[in-house]
Image (cartoon, grey):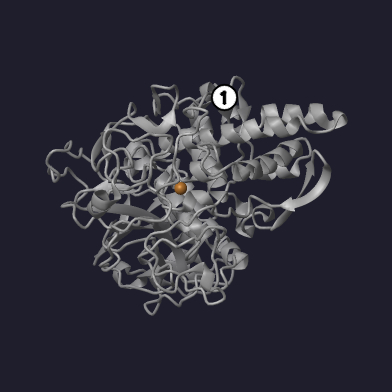
Amino acid sequence: MGLSHSSSYHSSHVRSVTESGPVIIEPYSTVYPRLDVLDMYNDEKYRPQFDLLVQSYQAMFDRPYEDMRSFYQIAGIHGLPYSAYDGVKGDHEYHNDTDWAQGRWGGYCHHGDVLFPPWHRPYMMLIESQLISEAKKIASQYPDNEKEKYVDAANQLRHPYWDWADLKAMNGVPEFFTSLEIELNTPKGKKNVTNPLKRYHLPVNLSYPLPDGQNPNDAPNYTLPSMDFNPYTPAGYPTVRHPNSKYEDQDNIMNQNFSVYVPTVFRPGFYQMFHIENFLHFSNHAVRGSNDTEMEDTNPGHPNPLVFVGYAHFASIETTHDGFHLVSGGLAGHLSYPDITGFDPLFFFHHCNVDRMFALWQGVWIPESVGINGTYTDVLYSKVNENTALTPFRKSTTDFWTSKDVRDVEKLGYTYPDLAKFKGQDPKNLQAYLLELYKPDPHYGRRFYVKLTIEAGKLVGPYSIRVFIDLPSANAETPVTSPHFAGFVAMWRNNAHTKVNSTTYVTGTVDITDCMEKLGIRMQKHDYVQDVNATTGEVKPTSIFDVNHDINIVPVLLDGKSVGPKDAGVTTIEAFSFEHDKVNQNFLVESTGEFYGTKKF
Ligand SMILES: [Cu+2]
């Protein structure tokens, strides 16, 4: 990539600790559910909460951006501007000039390790608690005849989630996230106000070194950035989703993406995930080692990376979550880039859903592991476990929240409607409910999957790896609406670990069952009985599946350009299947289940 990342970016000077003291996240005294945002919007009894939530987002946008409780500062914890939040530097503060080249991640967010799900939990609580405090202030301003209703709503307010794997998400992102204005009942009556759920305007320049011609100021000839750069957002410019050359959102493209990816990637991803019991497999997208087994100590001086057994066949919560980021952000959309994703308000509705999935998942808890990417406070390959400080989230002036602390969401003061419904019951009942909720089309007794193993860092992401069936000519121009398109694996990483002498793999799966059905393809050899139409006696045109020939892998960069599978890090694809509703836990162990072949690149 040949890019020097050592230049400083524009905004490193903006962090400062406010006079109001450190930001401490406290559990709420009463438990209320985090609602489905569609219920909050559509159900009259929750609508006051929605009115307050939206106004509270605006209020956080309006706080001085130097304030640690402002939207800017909180959104900036995740990635850029790679500077200390609230003075939290850890024992190994990140320095851009030396650490970037090592491939260390400069935000606080954990990705690619077991702390991916728990780290985002106090993060959600931080923004949520700030919104609640704004909501309480706003509620007290309503006229007397409405005040009580709004004060109650503020007390019950928890951050809602958007379930983007629900069938309703096939229609795209709900309009209240995409309209420029929104009608609310405010303390001054019903009003159309600027909609803060659509976008956030950056108060400072935010970028990596700016490449020529990729400046939103150049609109209408804005050049979408190449893959090597995070998009540059000058002060005063908003976050965008699937922008065009005028730096305008293309919601139609985004929504069309959802119609394709909800059934092919998101639902199968969650369906798979709720079969998993092992936290390593459930929690994150990364696996280390050349053959999914024990690694030698490649980084002397740091804890030895632990034994990673195979990641089995199923998608982790992070893999499916990664897909959402690319589908909603598109090329040059903020959601697509880990460094700047937190600035799009949709991020928090998405991560609330991820937190919900984490709360609903009933497997075993966090084992000790390794943080392969490092963070703003942790060096590469730090040992991580349930007692690791989830920086920069303070639970007191001296202590940080840990994963152990945040395990039980009710103790934090919230729950989710479906979690509450199954409270006290056998966890198997909840699992059965979830498998039903996210079940892919149940018409087919057997599900077929393609599993991809991808070497991370081969290519600077984000990019996607599309899977087509029986279309050897498939390329980057082949539309994802083609009947041959089965799904994709998202590579949501942006730093190549060029200097680190070890390899990290990402595994992802694509459910190809629906696609095979559409194309009339069967994997079972000589399946004559099923190939004959029982009524007409007509022999259906079926073909025998050949993994080597019939699975076509097309990596596509966000700018629409294609690279070969090998250049994108794809090392192996495998096809396998299992019977619907009869998933044996043994299947989840590597080398079980029905295999149909392997192709190596
Ligand atoms: Cu995320």
Relative to 274, residue 518 above or below: below
* Secondary-structure class at tag 1: loop
Residue at far top of view: 29
Image position of 98 (left or right of 170): left
Task: Look at the numbered disc 1 and say if its residue's Cβ is closer than 8 Å to ligand 1.
Answer: no
Near-viewer residue (535 or 463): 463
Near-viewer residue (332 or 428): 332
Image position of 447 (left or right of 494): right
Counting from the top left corner in percent of width and height, residue 593 is at: 32, 49
Counting from the top left corner in percent of width and height, residue 195 is at: 68, 52
Instruction: State which quadrant residue 382 falls in.
Output: top left
Residue 481 in sight here: no
Residue at far right of view: 145
Image position of 70 (left or right of 231): right
Near-viewer residue (507 or 497): 497
- Quarter of the rendering occupied by the N terminus: bottom left
Numbered label tally:
1
Residue 526 in sight here: yes
Q: Residue at x 42, y 55 (%)?
A: 10
Counting from the top left corner in percent of width and height, residue 320 is at: 44, 50
Counting from the top left corner in percent of width and height, residue 127 is at: 55, 37
Q: Residue at x 12, y 44 (%)?
A: 296
- Give the residue type at disc 1: Gly
- Quarter of the rendering occupied by the C terminus: bottom left
Instruction: State which quadrant residue 181 falls in.
Output: bottom right
Within-10-Å neighbours for mark 1: few <14, some 14–19, many 20+: some
Relative to 51, residue 175 above or below: below
Instruction: Tell me the residue that label 1 is attached to.
Output: 413
